[in-house]
Amino acid sequence: MMPYWLKKNFNMEDIEYMQKILRSFHLHTVCEEAFCPNISECFTSKTATFLIMGRYCTRNCRFCNVVHHKPETINPKESDMIAQATQNLNLKYVVITSVTRDDLPDFGSSCFVNVVEKLKPLNVKIELLIPDFQCKTEYLQLVANSGAQVIGHNIETVKRLYPKARPQADYSSSLNVLKKLKQLNPNLITKSGIMLGFGETQDEVIETINDIVQTGCDILTIGQYLRPSKEHLPVVKFIDPSDFEYYKSIGIKIGFKYVESSVFTRSSYNAENAYDHLESKKT
């Protein structure tokens, strides 16, 4: 039985409105594909995280609800449709993420760049949440210098649990993605996220937070893992809200510029607030 703090209300009217707009452009959001608990809150504020390169992923992470299947053909008009939807919804901050496309020669990096190019004339802030591109420098270079203000890559869980939760990924390689992004563009704001509840220990969480900040990462998100279905990894523990506050204090203390940490925090949750906070520090 889920604890009381995991109850959340949904506004179906706003969800249905956003879905109607998105479907009219044949677009998908990770909000829907991943069954994000914040979908109502984000759609109410007309915020969405666009999922590019189709709905099917070439990897099969054991916590993720995005479908592992033979990938779809890239839609050459996808970036134009995202730009049009952004205008129609009057969005000011746009997050772009994707399935992992290990089948593509450049792992989909050029698709991210194409979307950024279409969004630039709209005067919106752009955040990319990228897969690892197999840590190839030339493809990380493309997105690092694309013009996006923020680029994130999630570590997701502690090192010990990687073979169980992310069997086709590598903990050290993911850390190296964050490190390379910062080296390739020191002015870039970088971001990462982890989920709790897989069975990690407190020491392992703190070790992971330390590993991420050492890459030069600016923003950290920490949230509760919620099992999408019986086919996915079970929740070992529902983390108390006070523990999220504790990990937030640790993150700030060791050097993150912004930490979003709560039961319902997800990668793009309050993304614009984090960006604005860092920009205000500059001025």
Image: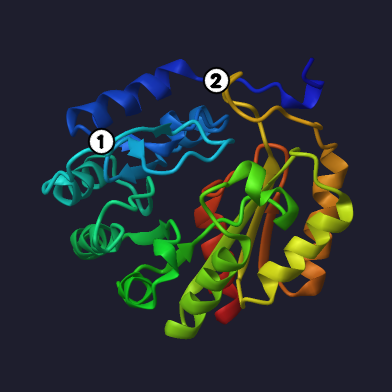
Task: State the CA–CA distance, disc 2 to disc 1.
Answer: 22 Å
In the picture, which quadrant includes the N terminus? top right
Q: Can residue 23 be seen in this view?
A: yes
In the picture, which quadrant includes the C terminus? bottom right
Amino acid type indicated by mark 1? Leu
Tell me residue 195's x, y (percent).
67, 45
| Residue to which mark 2 is pinned | 10
Could you tell me which residue is drawn at 43 percent across and 56 percent down? 131
Say above or below: 174 vs 18: below
Could you tell me which residue is drawn at 18 percent across and 28 percent down? 24
Quarter of the view holding residue 12: top left
Q: Residues within 10 Å of mark 2 (few under 14, many from 20)?
A: few
Amino acid type indicated by mark 2? Phe
Nearest the viewer among 144 and 7 is: 144
Q: Is residue 186 visible?
A: no
Depth-wise, is mark 2 or mark 1 nearer the camera?
A: 1
